[in-house]
Image (cartoon, grey):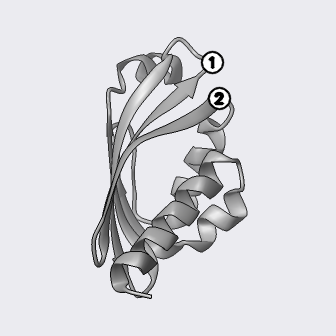
């Protein structure tokens, strides 16, 4: 399997796992010292991200993939998070960097205006 195929397998596995609510499997794809930078939160460890995802799953109805890009150790996904909240459908772009077969870095970009209101931030 090429590095590109490995990257695709890891990123798709992670994304499908969290989107379906399989938090334990999603966590297994992440490096312990994950660097996460998002439109609302920033974390320096995987467990903090997993906790945030667990809360987000309470309003998530579906994740609809728009486009994907995979390279040797990087990936970019564009997708819509359909929620049953006033935020509605959230167009999202997510960048991944892999190191040693784990997701080491995630940069998540989306319009967080409505979610911030819901969270009181």
Front in this rendered view, residue 1 or 96: 1
Is residue 77 visible to the viewer in this orientation of the structure? no
x and y, in percent, of residue 55 in the image: 64, 39
Q: In the picture, which quadrant includes the N terminus?
A: bottom left
Element under disc 1: loop
Front in this rendered view, residue 59 or 13: 13
x and y, in percent, of residue 46 in the image: 51, 65
Residue 104 versus residue 21 in the image, above or below: below
The image quarter in which residue 75 lies: bottom left
Residue 49 versus residue 28 in the image, above or below: above
Give the number of callouts.
2
Q: In the picture, which quadrant includes the C terminus?
A: top left
- Left or right: 95 in relation to 82: left
Quick check: marks 2 and 1 in contact, CB under 8 Å? yes
The image quarter in which residue 7 lies: bottom left
Q: Determine the residue positioned at 48% across, 76% down.
A: 31
The disc, 2 or 1, on the residue closer to the chain's N-terminal end is: 2
Give me the disc on residue 64.
none
x and y, in percent, of residue 11 in the image: 47, 65
Would you name the residue on which mark 2 appears?
Answer: 61
Residue 53 versus residue 22 in the image, above or below: above
Is residue 47 visible to the viewer in this orientation of the structure? yes
Residue 20 versus residue 95 in the image, above or below: above
Give me the disc on residue 84.
1
Q: Determine the residue positioned at 71% across, 64% down.
A: 24
């Amino acid at each position: 399997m090429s590095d590109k195929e490995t990257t695709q397998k890891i990123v798709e596995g992670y994304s499908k796992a969290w989107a379906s609510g399989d938090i334990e499997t999603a966590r297994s794809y992440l490096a312990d010292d994950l660097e996460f930078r998002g439109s609302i939160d920033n974390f320096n460890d995987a467990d903090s991200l997993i906790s945030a995802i667990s809360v987000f799953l309470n309003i998530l109805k579906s994740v609809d993939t728009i486009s994907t890009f995979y390279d040797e150790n990087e990936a970019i996904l564009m997708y819509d998070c359909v929620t049953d909240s006033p935020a509605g459908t959230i167009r999202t772009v997510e960048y991944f960097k892999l190191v040693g077969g784990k997701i080491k870095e995630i940069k998540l970009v989306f319009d967080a205006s409505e979610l911030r209101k819901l969270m009181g931030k």
